[in-house]
Amino acid sequence: MKNNKTSVRCDSVRSLNVSASKKGGLQQAVRNGAPAVLGILFVFVIWEVAVNVTHVSVDVLPSPTRVFRMLLVNRDKFWMHLIPTLQETLIGLGATILVAVFISVLCDFLPTVRKFVYPILVVSQTVPVIVIAPLMVIWFGYGLFPKIIVIVLVTFFSIAVALTDGFDSTEPETVNLLRSMGATKWQQFYYVRLPASLPSFFTGLRIAITWSVTAAIFGEYVGAERGLGIFMQICKNDFRTDLVLGSVIIISAVSLILFGVVAILRRLFIPWAAVAKAGAKK
Amino acid sequence: MLEVKQISKVFHKNGVPFEALRDVNLEVHEREFVSIIGPSGCGKSTLFNIIAGILPPDGGSVMVQGKDVTGKTEACALMPQKDLLFPWRKVADNTILALQIAGMKKKEAREKVEPYFSIFGIDGTQELYPAQLSGGMRQRASLLRTVVQDRPVLLLDEPFGALDSMTRTELQDWLLDIWQKQKWTVILVTHDIKEAVYLSDRVYVMTPSPSRVQEVISIDLPRPRTPEITMTTEFVKYEARLKHAFGKKESSEEGNT
């Protein structure tokens, strides 16, 4: 009896989701987002209560209300350090996409190049960022450039692999069909391999975007003039745990927003994916 | 119209030669419907790819309208077994794919295919995505994509093989009807004996590898045919004859082919 009820509920939720996707994602977004927001609120409440009950020192663990109050009080300072971090993240991600697209397209057209490049790609992933980031500071100083390199190194693999997989998802029968139509190699790429790779590309981008924020912070942490990473470092040394945690909250918020932007871009660029998914469910 | 002369093809798998086709001869007249049947793995697809010009033969030639088109893709339009409609293109945009590849502007190509949609019984699906269509509808769109290429010969590679039997019967009736009106030159590969008799003017029966033409059977049933014809004794006789030629092995599979 109990099982019956749940399964009925699941079905109705699914059909609601489908109708919501037709109306536009807003309703659906609220419905999907609500549990997440409640969950986070719950954690904050527990945290607040724990701090008040145990009277732990503010240097060790400040209450969330204090963290948010300090965020507000120091908003100019946070803003000043947020801008370079955002800049690095977006420029780094842009550079990653350019490099990844260039390399994976090259590998797609020239299998010989692929044999040479692929091992290098894999090896590049085994080098720990913890080592690379300080080296970048030694080689290139405290500016933007070393951060971009760190971000590209961290994120580029996920996009390159996603693109390569996407290109390869084309079936041999499809290639035969296109050849029978007289399509050149370039036309096969443009009409099939490229659009076929888009869903996979966005999956890679979703991973890359969260990593690129982390990589930017890390790049700053080992040496920068401004940015949330170096700001956290300074605050930590001053025992300003509240400001460190405030930075963490900002970083999380930025990551979430960028994640959302990718989801919106995905909808814009591949409107057929939702249709194909609904069709597959039928 | 189309002449396949002395085609042979040998594949090398891990250095071991495998003779797929040996001296295959085949002839199709203008506006004729010809079927090729044979057991699985008898090299039907290989022969098809050679006729389509996407696989070079080791020997022999393919002539269309007196012109040597061996290894050239210009003469034939291919309809694959799976519909292979691209999920990212609307149905109408899928049907114009070959036209765009040939360099036609999108708008012009859309105008060209538009009248076909009602002829093919899929009017109203132009702006839908393939995922929103049933399997039968998708095959119709797939045939439309093949037909609009205006090539002299249509090659249909087991186009109904992946459909459920109800849809398959429906589409066979539909193809019979539309072919009798349009009179394209068609080569159909199938392993469905009934389908071959029902649709064809002549049927080529192939042997297992190395594949060659075992027998050519003319289906002298009157045209235009209707679904009722499958119940006549004539029809059943042709079916029996093909089944016999096809070999006893395949007759046990008859229920699901």
Image: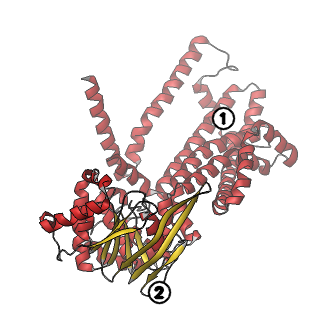
Residue B182: percent from left, percent from top: 27, 79
Q: Residue furthest bottom?
A: B66
Q: Residue furthest right?
A: A138
Q: Given the image, what chain letter belongs to the residue carrying mark 2?
A: B
Q: Is residue A93 above or below residue A44?
A: below
- Residue B30's tag is none
Confirm whether residue B52 shows in the render.
Answer: no
Whether callout 1 and callout 2 share a subunit is answered no
Q: Is residue B228 above or below residue A34?
A: below
* Near-viewer residue (B12 or A19): B12
How crowded is the residue under tag 1: few (<14 C-alpha within 10 Å), some, or many (20+)?
A: many
Residue A25: percent from left, percent from top: 40, 49
How crowded is the residue under tag 2: few (<14 C-alpha within 10 Å), some, or many (20+)?
A: few
Residue at 27% across / 23% down in the picture?
Answer: A2
* Residue marked by disc 1: A247
* Residue marked by disc 2: B67
In the rendered view of the protein, which quadrant contains the N terminus of chain B?
Answer: bottom left
Residue at 28% across / 38% down in the picture?
Answer: A12
Confirm whether residue B57 shows in the render.
Answer: yes
The answer to whether A46 appears left or right of A9 in the picture is right
Between marks 1 and 2, how big is the CA–CA gap?
A: 75 Å
Residue at 15% across / 70% down in the picture?
Answer: B226
The kind of secondary structure element at disc 1 is helix
In the rendered view of the protein, which quadrant contains the C terminus of chain B?
Answer: bottom left
Question: The disc labelled 1 sits on which kind of residue?
Answer: Ser
Question: The disc labelled 2 sits on which kind of residue?
Answer: Lys
Eye-nearest disc, 1 or 2: 2
The kind of secondary structure element at disc 2 is strand
Q: Is residue B2 above or below residue A21?
A: below
